[in-house]
Image (cartoon, helix red, strand yellow):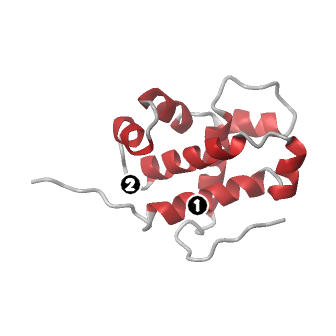
Amino acid sequence: MEIIAKPKGGNVDKMAEKVFLECLNILGGLKKLIEYRNLTWLPSLAESSYVIVLKNEAFKTYAEIARELGITEQTAKNIATADEAKVKKYLEGELEKPNEHIAGGIAKLAYNKLKREGRLDEEEVVIKN
């Protein structure tokens, strides 16, 4: 018998969007992101948001995530296993650039916050300025 895993919380696209927007909130909002002048983070944050949701909510393997997103299995694994504590210290200026996938760590911080607060499954998406 084939078992098809469905996302625990619902629509993967909506959940990834929430994680992405929470990433922006963690970084201080859109204005702060402009101050960083590092807008190349946006595609990586979007990709990382999907990887984290697909891994944790849709129970996809690294190979399945890689095929679905058009990335390598290693990239999917690097994102999913990033040490969010080290990335948080980096963002707070307490640590030199860690040897972690920074966008992956930010996405994990965002995902965990949304899960902890019970907001991952909500319909409303909130962007803080």
On residue 58, the disc is: 2
Residue at the outermost bottom position: 123
Quadrant for the C terminus in the image:
bottom right
Q: Is residue 85 left or right of residue 64?
A: right
Residue 111's image quarter?
bottom right
Residue 119, labelled with which disc? none
Q: CA distance from mark 2 to mark 1?
A: 15 Å
Q: Residue at x 68, y 46 (%)?
A: 42
Q: Is residue 58 above or below residue 11?
A: above
Q: How many marks?
A: 2
* Quadrant of the drawing holding the N terminus: bottom left
Between circles 2 and 1, the one closer to the viewer is: 1
What is the crowding at mark 1: few (fewer than 14 residues within 10 Å), some, or many (at least 20)?
some
Residue 18 is situated, as x and y percent measured from the top left of the image, at 60, 62
Identify residue type, mark 1: Glu
Is 29 placed above or below 34 here? below
Q: Which residue is mark 1?
A: 17
Q: Residue at x 37, y 49 (%)?
A: 59
Amino acid type for the residue under numbered disc 2: Ala
- Secondary structure under tag 2 reads loop
Q: Is residue 4 left or right of residue 44?
A: left
- Label 1 SS: helix
Q: Left or right of 106: which side holds 47?
A: left
> Percent position (x, y) of residue 90?
79, 34
Q: Residues within 10 Å of mark 2 (few under 14, many from 20)?
A: many
Residue at image point 42% right, 68% down: 10
Looking at the picture, does residue 6 appear above or below residue 46? below
Q: Position of residue 31 (x, y in %)?
A: 87, 56
